[in-house]
Amino acid sequence: AQSVAQPEDQVNVAEGNPLTVKCTYSVSGNPYLFWYVQYPNRGLQFLLKYITGDNLVKGSYGFEAEFNKSQTSFHLKKPSALVSDSALYFCAVREGSNYQLIWGAGTKLIIKP
Amino acid sequence: DAGVIQSPRHEVTEMGQEVTLRCKPISGHNSLFWYRQTMMRGLELLIYFNNNVPIDDSGMPEDRFSAKMPNASFSTLKIQPSEPRDSAVYFCASSLLGGGTDTQYFGPGTRLTVL
């Protein structure tokens, strides 16, 4: 069965430091992987996705994610965190022709000045 | 493009009343998804449509919930009768499936409170 795990409920980072939000997945075929961000009282916004090709994917707001097939991971990263990056981050996966996304529980990212 | 449009943004109703949530997907998208978000259960897929046809409604909680998509530019999610446990934020998302870019784009959500 397909699944997504975001092992950290919350991540705290000081402004200016690099940040990582972790995501691991389980699918039986080739994964399509997504990251979304949700600001308070807003809908989810698409950040980036991996379908195929280069393992390092660059997205909006300076975020990037690295697809690691051997570790079945798709961690979200940013070299220098901003206070405005504080939000809830969701990882999602789907497999091939199955159009449903399987969502992680979300990770609350707090960037402290 | 205006993005996915949902109405109302907030709805407060009393238990037993009928509630209708509305969604206008992004023009040209062929798939529409209804989600529910709560603190306890996170983000749950309720139902999704492809080319206006319901494909999977296994996430619909019970018969009190129904969804329709009469045309490519409009969908409704109805709860009748509503119960306090239905209180949640309901999101609609649309995407272009099969076109190589299958990213789901979300609306701002409807915050439903059932008293």
Image: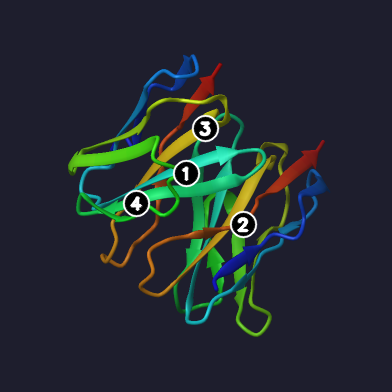
Residue A84 lies, in percent from the top left, at: 67, 37
CA separation, marks 3 and 1? 15 Å
Q: Quadrant of residue A75?
A: bottom right
Q: Are marks 1 and 4 in contact (CB under 8 Å)?
A: no
Say if B66 sits above or below B103 in the image.
above
Q: Are marks 3 and 1 on the same chain?
A: yes
The residue depicted at 66 percent of the width and 38 percent of the height is B39
Choose mark 3 or mark 1, whichever is in front.
1
Instruction: Tell me the residue at 33%/38% (across/down).
Output: B66
CA gap between label 4 and label 2 equals 19 Å
- Which label belongs to residue B61? 1
Counting from the top left corner in percent of width and height, residue B19 is at 38, 23
| Residue at the disc numbered 3 | B89
Q: Amino acid at mark 1?
A: Pro
Mark 4 belongs to which amino acid? Tyr
Which secondary structure, mark 4?
A: strand
Circle 1 or circle 4, nearest the eye: 1
Residue B60 position within the rendered picture, expressed as x and y whole percent measured from the top left: 43, 46
Residue highlighted by disc 2: A104
* Residue lying at 22% horizontally and 43% vertically, measured from the top left: B27
Return the disc, 3 or 1, that comes first in the chain's sequence.
Answer: 1
Q: Position of residue A43 (x, y in %)?
A: 50, 37
Identify the subunit bearing mark 1: B
Disc 3 chain ID:
B
Name the mark on residue A37: none
- Which residue is disc 4 drawn over? B48
Vertical relation: B101 (above or below) A106 = below
